[in-house]
Image: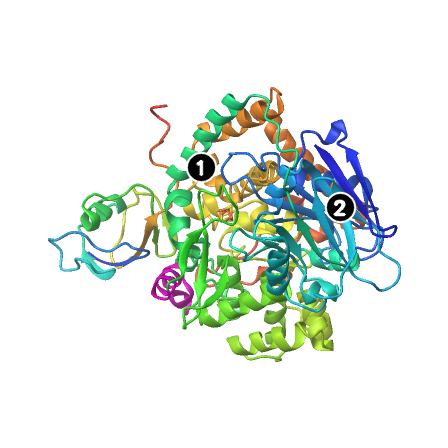
Amino acid sequence: MRIEIKLYGHLKCLNEKLDCLNKNRFCLEAAQGTILSEIHKMIFVNPADNLVSIVDGHAQKPDYSIEHDCSISIFPPMGGRTHNPFEKI
Amino acid sequence: MKIYRVNMSKLSFTMEAVPEEWRLLGGRGLTSAIVAKEVEPTCNALGSKNKLVFAPGLFAGTMAANSGRLSVGAKSPLTGGIKESNSGGTAAQRLAKLGVKALIIEGIPEGDKWYCLHVHKDGVEIKEENELLGKGNYEVIHTMTSRYGENTGVMTIGQAGEHKMSLANISVKDPKGHIRSAGRGGLGAVMGSKRIKFITLDDNDGAGIEIKDKEKFKNAAQVFNKGLLSHPVSGQALPRYGTDVLVNILNEAGGLPTKNYRYGQFEGAENISGETMYDTIMSRDGDPTHGCHVGCVIRCSQTYNDKDKRYLTSGFEYETIWAFGAGCTCDDLDVIAHIDHECDDIGIDTIDTAGSMMVAMEAGLLPWGDGEGMLRMIKEEIKEATPLGRILGNGPNFTGKAFGVTRIGTVKGQTMPAYEPRAVKGIGITYATTPMGADHTAGYSVTANILKVGGHIDPLKKEGQIELSRNLQIATASLDSAGLCIFVAFAVLDYEPVSHAIIDMINAQYGVNWSVDDWFNLGRSVLKTEMEFNRAAGLTEKDDRLPEFMEEQLPPHNTVWDFTGEELDSVLQF
Ligand code: SF4
């Protein structure tokens, strides 16, 4: 299925295997049932925690299942915690 | 510590001991307690019975990061209720270093002379002032800095405050000599009513800050600091893009109020976004990140230069950019920066000035999107206090009455800021119910509604919003009392050790044994005091409602404001 991606801030596609390398506005093909965190991995290879993703106007969690023709806006790390810097304190 | 009290009717000064009941209050907690105790709620906000109170927070002047915010309190001429207006700048830390817990200004001088105050270790000198009357805030700050030196704190009002306009704010000098503002609620008009043009602060040889257990305080402050720097919002996004990072996020989420709250998205958003601002700042040799006071580790402020690389403005906030931008459909960031500069200089709150402009556009006084027109109105009408300028300068409700406009986006007379209540419902609850009038900082539900900080609550649904706003309002009232910047809340909400560090710092500094419950009880009691003042001032449940037009559907989600009066009345029942 086809999805539209908009990257904000300093984010751009870092996956050298994709045509959209270094771009911040592009379309991607993804398999049915793909979840948001897999899209993050596809684009950034090693995605940062706490990316804010808004799918068709709705903020969604990393396990959200995306749908054909959706538009995903991804913002730099500024979301709530996924790891706790105090775990080792 | 002590209380400095200035009586402008008698032109006298007294130094008082801090009553025991105020010992563990600071910032908003203290300004609201003093206003509630000493100001008749039904008094005229611009009359002699109102008092203007400046208070640093509980941690001001210490090594606790981001603890140098200043609270300014009074009865508000804009809302008719109690007001705490919060500012960065160097004043809070200087007051704390002088050992001043609060500076209370009461009375009104006889005759028509103007005055300035000079605050120092031995008290306050009250001097006649003529030279800087009619001048803007930048000139006041530059003149006082050359007269008394770089290390002088300045709090000043511009022309709007002199004319007692309800949009008038109080400007506070920041570490670079630029301007931060106690923006909301018209407290510059209260200062103008007391005919004080400016206050200078000299903290040389001040008594300093006592910390009972220095080692414990230092350890807690280090944990606190680490938490702020580790959090993605306060450690990465805000330092790089400033608060304007929110333009694209709110726009994509359909929550960017556009054209006087008609739409949730603005087609010119990209042009006024944090990303565009960052690129512009970098291309013009500006400074993308600095703190509004010493000890801020988040540093969300910036210096924005004009096309010729000359200083234009700083502290250029998302709310300002939204207000004149999407709110008035202007997508020219340079024009908005010019407007921000003028507002700072004249001393008017940007959110409420834009609120007046939205009403002016509804009335046909200006075309939508006319940035140059807004700049002209601010410079030629408000600054000059023409009849039209006085109407605009007294806020959106006043302007609406003058021109027969009913689509006015205010609560208690104060403009709803940059987050659409129909698309970010938690913030709508805060706008409606905070004793301050529409104020995003009073309970910033954008955290859980959009950024998934402190959990995630669907911004378009009703479920969970009342509890979210209530809890955030309580926590914010506590943070405001500590003098902490609201942006510490991201780390506080997400990392438990950070909130514990705050309690540890209080216990170490004041030699007490507070628990987390005591901390939240502080916030509850601040809100209770403020609500009681508002009810005694004549504000009722009807004032805790959003404007009627919020029942219209908001594109793109086509949601409506659907909270009942009963639900809203339950928010701050505790
Ligand atoms: S984060 Fe921003 S508002 Fe807060 S203290 Fe720092 S510069 Fe001021």
Choose top left, top right, bottom left or bottom right for residue B20: top right
Residue B46 in magenta stretch? no
Q: Position of residue B429 (x, y in %)?
A: 59, 48
Q: Secondary structure at mark 2?
A: strand
- What's drawn in magenta, residue-wise? B268-284
From the viewer's perspective, tell me whether residue B481 is left or right of residue B368.
right
Q: Amino acid at mark 1?
A: Ala
Coordinates of residue B474 in the picture (x, y in percent): 60, 37
Q: Which residue is mark 2?
A: B124
Q: Residues within 10 Å of mark 1 (few under 14, many from 20)?
A: many
Q: Residue at x 55, y 52 (%)?
A: B174
The answer to which of marks 2 and 1 sits earlier in the sequence is 2
Q: Callout 1: helix, strand or loop? A: helix
Name which residue type carries label 2: Val
In this picture, residue B121 sits left or right of residue B252: right
Whole-percent x and y of residue B424? Answer: 50, 52
* Above/below status of B56 relative to B132: above
Residue B50 appears in view: yes
Tell me where residue B446 appears, x and y as whole percent: 48, 48
The local crowd at label 2, few if under 14, some if 14 to 19, many if 20 or more residues have their Cα within 10 Å, is: many
Residue in front for this viewpoint, B402 or B274 = B274
Q: Residue B420 vs residue B83: left or right?
A: left
Q: Which mark is residue B87?
A: none
Q: Which mark is residue B491?
A: 1
Q: Nearer the viewer, residue A20 or B223?
A: B223
Write the residue at 71% across / 72% down.
B391
Instruction: Report whether residue B370 is seen.
Output: no
